[in-house]
Image: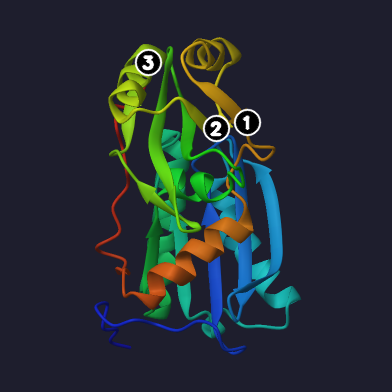
Amino acid sequence: MAVDMTRGMSLDDEASVIAAWDTCTVRGALAVARGGKVQAEEYFEAVKGHTGWLMPQLDRVVRILGMEPGDIDLVATGVGPGTFTGVKVGISTAKAVALGLGIPLAAVPTLDVLARQAHADAPYVIAAVDARRGQFYAAVYRLESGGLERLTGYLCLEPSGLLEVLDGLGVEEAAFVGEVPGPLLEELSSGVRLEEAAEKYPTAEALVGLAVEMARVGDLTDAVGALPVYLKEPV
């Protein structure tokens, strides 16, 4: 089936099915949605070794819902930044599904998913994922008319580096969502007032919501075009 990636795709009708997952952080998420609404969601520890069961897990959830794999209209995956293995597993599985079914793919940045979960009154949002060795992956967003505008690229830096970025943007108060080591968060808190979000990992609702929005504006790709967001060499 040929798919025009430049055209918007509506997934609001009850017949439209999305299969989505993010394996880029410590806790992975898997969801199947119909009509833009999550019908089933599962969370799991995203450790080495989940490569072999992500596809069977998807197949199991789809069949529990009374569907067939061929009913899936769109596959969505978190593309990082995050753990090297997790990013690779999520994207490679999504590529296999998209190629096998001949359907489009929504490549969803993991930090964008996290930022969507802030649910705070602060004027800015900081989304972050632990990058190890005293660093984190982060992006800064501004709340705009109920939506989010990303103000930075996807960054990999130490707390002092992020504080410089925030100072340049004039950020004094922000909602923080994600999980990073306590000492790094404390250092960041010393320069900016932070309101921590209750949910620290990508959720099915946020992931599916972003995938639906991307589909509407035609921001989709295929099995060949989906690219990971790697900000540093794997260690």
- Percent position of residue 194, x then y: 56, 25
Visible in this render: residue 234?
Answer: no
Q: Which residue is mark 3?
A: 158
Toward the viewer: 216 or 96?
A: 216
Q: Nearer the viewer, residue 152 or 113?
A: 152
How crowded pointer 2 is (Cα within 10 Å; few <14, some 14-19, many 20+) is rated as many
Q: Quadrant of the N terminus?
A: bottom left
Query: Looking at the rendered structure, which numbered label has been put on residue 196?
Result: 1
Residues under labels 1 and 2: Cα distance? 5 Å
| 229 left or right, relative to 197 | left
Name which residue lies at 31% across and 24% down.
165
Marks 3,2: beta carbons within 8 A: no
Q: Report, in whole angstroms, how far the alpha carbon at label 3 lies from the one at label 1.
A: 19 Å
Q: Position of residue 132 (x, y in %)?
A: 45, 19
Instruction: Choose mark 3 or mark 2, whichever is in front.
Output: 2
Nearer-N-terminus badge (1/2): 2
Image x and y of residue 65, in percent:
73, 77
Question: CB under 8 Å between callouts 1 and 2?
Answer: yes
Q: Helix or strand or loop: what does disc 3 sit on?
A: loop
* Residue 45 placement: quadrant: top right
Element under disc 2: strand
Where disc 1 sits, the SS reads strand
C-alpha separation, residue under disc 3 versus residue under disc 2: 16 Å
Provide the residue designation for mark 2.
176
